[in-house]
Amino acid sequence: MEKHIYVIGSMSMDLVVATDIVPGKGETVLGNSFFNAPGGKGANQAVAAARLGHHVHMVGRIGNDDFGEYIFQNLKNNGVNAEYVKPTEGKSGTAHITLNDNDNSIIVVPSANNEVTPEYVKHVLESTNVGDIVLLQQEIPAETVEAVVKYCYDHELISILNPAPYREVSDEVIEKATYLTPNETESEKMFKGEVDQALERYPDKLIVTLGELGAVYHDGVQQVEIKGFKREVKDTTGAGDTFNGALAVGLQRDYELPKALTFANLAASHSVTGMGAQGGMPTLEDLQDDIEV
Ligand code: RIB
């Protein structure tokens, strides 16, 4: 039976300002441009996986506002199954993004994403099958992340926890998640500066992403570096989400971990070539010249 990918997580409208000057406290500056585009780490991961041609279910909440409608339509336009996306009273999540000097800084207001509760996701989890892949991030309540990781562990589902944005993660979640995919900053916080030791302690589980330099994990014998791909950067927003969505697809295609990570790095490198979190996310055809898929 084909494995399905379930993304349990956030959906937001990204409100993006490009500026040469980032204002200090109490300061006003003139920016260069503004656009809004669908985002949210969960929705981005779902769209990334669906663009690579796989069955993806998004599980989350939108507000009963125009942003919510836009977010919902965008999932459907990208071939994501949105049956488990339900509106709730109030506003959709928003992310307030500043683009400056080839990088971004983001303030997320979760709003409807706070309604992705353990109760809300329970009936979805009950419809999964052994071996299905569940992707999680941290723009939804911590108790939901905990409950889902434990459910996956108990029911032989593969869980990928992308601990972004960073908040404390319990030891039990770290032990029970199948894969953890922090970036360098998140891994430093998560393991209190002892990342090399953590890599060794969690072989084939802890994968630290390094942007265009690739990713590193430990295979039980030694640290393994998976190379990245350098491309001209337009917008780095969503590169980590593309990595996670593509990693799920690679695992779903039964790739060994090194190949799944190369595939994820390659997809993430494409994502920075377009504007907006989802603008540069590749299709499978886009990757075929660089990797046998
Ligand atoms: O990872 C990028 C995403 O983070 C953006 O789309 C924004 O919504 C924030 O959640």
Image: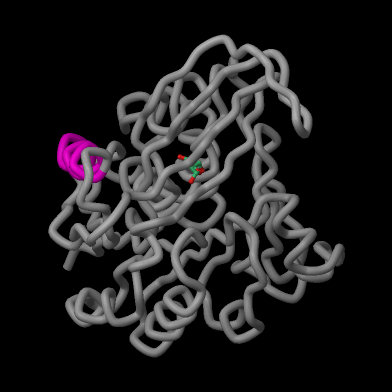
Residue 152 to residue 139: above or below: below
- Assess whether residue 72 is covered by the magenta stretch: yes
The magenta segment: 68-79
Quarter of the image for residue 208 reads: bottom right
Give me the residue at 73% from left, 59% from top: 187
Give me the residue at 48% from left, 41% from top: 95
Query: Residue 27 versus residue 199: which sits nearer the camera?
Result: 27
Q: Where is residue 136 in the image (x, y as percent from the top left)?
A: 44, 63
Residue 140 to residue 293: above or below: below
Number of marks: 0
Give me the residue at 57% from left, 29% from top: 236
- Assess whether residue 147 is covered by the magenta stretch: no
Q: Where is residue 23 in the image (x, y as percent from the top left)?
A: 73, 25
Q: Where is residue 17 in the image (x, y as percent from the top left)?
A: 53, 22
Query: Residue 130 versus residue 121: which sits nearer the camera?
Result: 121
Q: Where is residue 245 in the image (x, y as percent from the top left)?
A: 41, 48
